[in-house]
Image: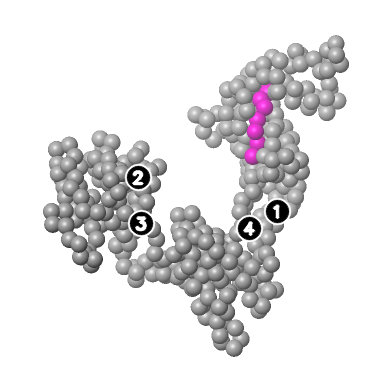
């Protein structure tokens, strides 16, 4: 936090730009279509071919290795109870038990498609570099389901030597099932506002935009009043018109391409203390305050002569930050003061600390 001020703090004024400067944005800038989500497949596998950097005396690893040897018609000898004698395998250091995951894209995928998969050591392996993942079945995201959606195998590539217990098998996951992500349910689609844009005001504005869009007028030229409605601050239900019933993808394209001026958003201040960055929405207001910190004092708003008039101009947080910059406050000072404003109830916006 002792680096130069300008390299550590960025005060971003989201709404200082005029509406014309922003231009019109698209609905897709704020929303996604429900049903278009990624799916994560997962499994437990064995990596072989390590150079003495595998698991050391881990019972689950030796049991898994014994099971594979048995499947390949090379079983280990049995102990007195008829169970595999794991003592034969306990010192195998070229093997590691690993978790394997693969992500199916939001758009879906077809049987036979190949994806990258991530492999992570489950126990005390020191490095997976140079290893080979044995054929590993990947299950679906729902716990308890035994349905195999993909098979994964191949040579491991460690991308970061500092994290040698995590590796990638490039195109090592082959899908055994089709992934279709339906987006129309009962003749409707659901728009989901992205988390940083979610809000009742934004949802209502987008629903109103769709209700009054010329692109969705009926054949007689009238609007379809109930084509869209905001369910809550996140979800917007949109009915598919009859003329798009056989072409839902074309309808979704039209919806997402609708142009909208930037909706009003809640005031937010985002602080990253690690790098000393402060991102301030320009509509973030503060109460009238007097700040004394270390060796400087700053006032913002009509602190000395408080007014009770309802049309009194609000004080922006940017005004205070500009004043703090003028007296050469450090990023740490500014962050501490903003936190103090929030605790004092004088910050009229959401404070997010990363």
| Camera-nearest label, 2 or 1 | 2
Q: Give the residue displayed 34% in from the left and 59% down from the top.
A: 14
Q: Give the residue displayed 70% in from the left and 32% down from the top.
A: 45
Q: CA distance from mark 1 to mark 3?
A: 39 Å
Q: Where does the magenta region start and end?
A: 94-101
**Residue placed furthest toward the top:** 80
For residue 181, above or below residue 121: below
Q: Nearer the viewer, residue 297 or 243?
A: 297
* Residue at which label 1 appears: 179
Q: Secondary structure at mark 2?
A: strand
| Camera-nearest label, 4 or 1 | 4
Q: Give the residue displayed 83% in from the left and 12% down from the top.
A: 79
Q: Earlier in the sequence, mark 2 or mark 1?
A: 1
* Residue at which label 2 appears: 271
Q: CA distance from mark 4 to mark 1?
A: 11 Å
Q: Secondary structure at mark 1?
A: loop
């Amino acid at each position: 936090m002792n680096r130069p001020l300008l390299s550590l703090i960025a005060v971003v004024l989201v709404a200082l730009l005029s509406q014309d400067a922003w231009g019109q944005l698209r609905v897709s800038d704020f929303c996604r279509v429900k049903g278009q989500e990624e799916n994560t497949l997962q499994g437990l596998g064995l990596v072989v071919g390590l150079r003495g950097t595998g698991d050391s005396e881990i019972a689950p690893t030796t049991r898994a290795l014994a099971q594979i040897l048995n499947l390949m018609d090379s079983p280990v000898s049995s102990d007195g109870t008829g169970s595999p004698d794991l003592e034969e395998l306990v010192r195998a250091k070229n093997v590691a038990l690993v978790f394997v995951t693969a992500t199916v894209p939001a758009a879906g995928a077809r049987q036979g498609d190949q994806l990258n998969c991530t492999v992570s050591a489950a126990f005390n392996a020191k490095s997976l570099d140079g290893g080979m993942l044995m054929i590993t079945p990947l299950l679906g995201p729902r716990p308890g389901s035994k349905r195999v959606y993909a098979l994964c195998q191949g040579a491991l590539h460690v991308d970061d030597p500092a994290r040698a217990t995590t590796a990638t098998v490039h195109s090592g996951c082959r899908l055994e099932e089709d992934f279709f992500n339906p987006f129309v349910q009962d003749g409707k689609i659901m728009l989901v506002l992205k988390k940083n844009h979610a809000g009742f005001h934004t949802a209502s504005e987008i629903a109103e935009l769709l209700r009054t869009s010329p692109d969705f007028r009926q054949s007689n030229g009238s609007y379809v009043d109930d084509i869209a409605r905001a369910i809550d601050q996140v979800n917007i239900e949109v009915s598919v018109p009859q003329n798009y019933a056989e072409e839902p993808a074309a309808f979704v394209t039209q919806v997402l391409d609708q142009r909208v001026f930037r909706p009003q958003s809640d005031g937010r201040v985002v602080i990253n203390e690690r790098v000393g960055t402060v991102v301030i929405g320009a509509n973030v207001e503060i109460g009238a305050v007097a700040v004394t910190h270390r060796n400087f004092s700053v006032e913002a708003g009509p602190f000395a002569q408080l007014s009770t008039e309802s049309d009194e101009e609000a004080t922006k947080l940017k005004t205070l930050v500009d004043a703090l910059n003028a007296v050469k406050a450090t990023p740490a000072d500014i962050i501490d003061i903003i936190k103090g404003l929030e605790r004092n109830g004088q910050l009229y916006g959401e404070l997010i600390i990363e």
